[in-house]
Amino acid sequence: MQSLTLLNKLAKLEKSYQEKNIIDFLKYPVEFEEIPIITQKGREDIFLETFSKKDFDVFFLNVALFYLNNIKLMARKVLSEEERKDLFFCITYPDLELSDLYGFNIPNICISKTKYKEKFEEKPQVNLDQMLWLKNSLEQLGYIDTFKIVYSKSDDGFGGEFFRVFLLNKE
């Protein structure tokens, strides 16, 4: 499994995914924290030996799901049930414009207070036929019916807008 070896390399570069930092995110949560799978352009290059760039959307979504599930397991280990009830986890794509820079979309792990879950769920649903890269990734991974996928539109502060996509577990 060459991809697991490469993921270990990436995890060493991306400090936010190291165990101590994840425990800090869990024990001392802010209202809304997004942890990107990749924080610097070029860190994805190690995966080009194994995957073509056109496969990165599905690969990095799979990585995000892997990290998300492991963070949830870690939360069970380090937090009480009451503390876990106060946290909400999901996957986000915070800036779809980055796909122009990277050539693929970069998912984030979102850790937020549970009180925001309802606000996220009230957002408009994404039409996956207009986001074929996400639809194809979810289909390839077998998760097409697993998530409620919503989006928010915000002012970027420079006269433009940016879209944030949320993959929320259906319950």
Image: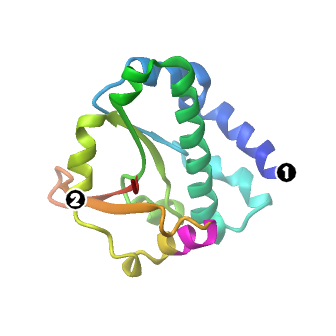
Q: What residue sits right under mark 1 in the picture?
A: 1
Q: Is residue 160 left or right of residue 2?
A: left
Residue 33 at least partly seen: no
Q: Label 2 sits on what residue type?
A: Lys
Q: Is residue 30 magenta?
A: no
Q: What residue sits right under mark 2 in the picture?
A: 123
In percent of width and height, residue 170 lies at: 40, 57
**Quarter of the rendering containing residue 67:** top right
Instruction: Give the farthest residue toward the bottom.
Output: 129
Instruction: Give above or below for 22 relative to 104.
Output: above
Q: Which residue: 40% across, 81% down?
A: 129
Q: Is residue 122 left or right of residue 128?
A: left
Q: Mainly helix, strand or loop, the magenta region?
A: helix
Q: Is residue 63 left or right of residue 76?
A: right
Q: Which residue: 51% across, 26% down?
A: 75
Label 1 CA crowd tier, 10 Å (few <14, some 14–19, many 20+): few
Q: Which residue: 58% across, 32% down?
A: 73
Total numbered circles? 2
Q: Secondary structure at mark 2?
A: loop
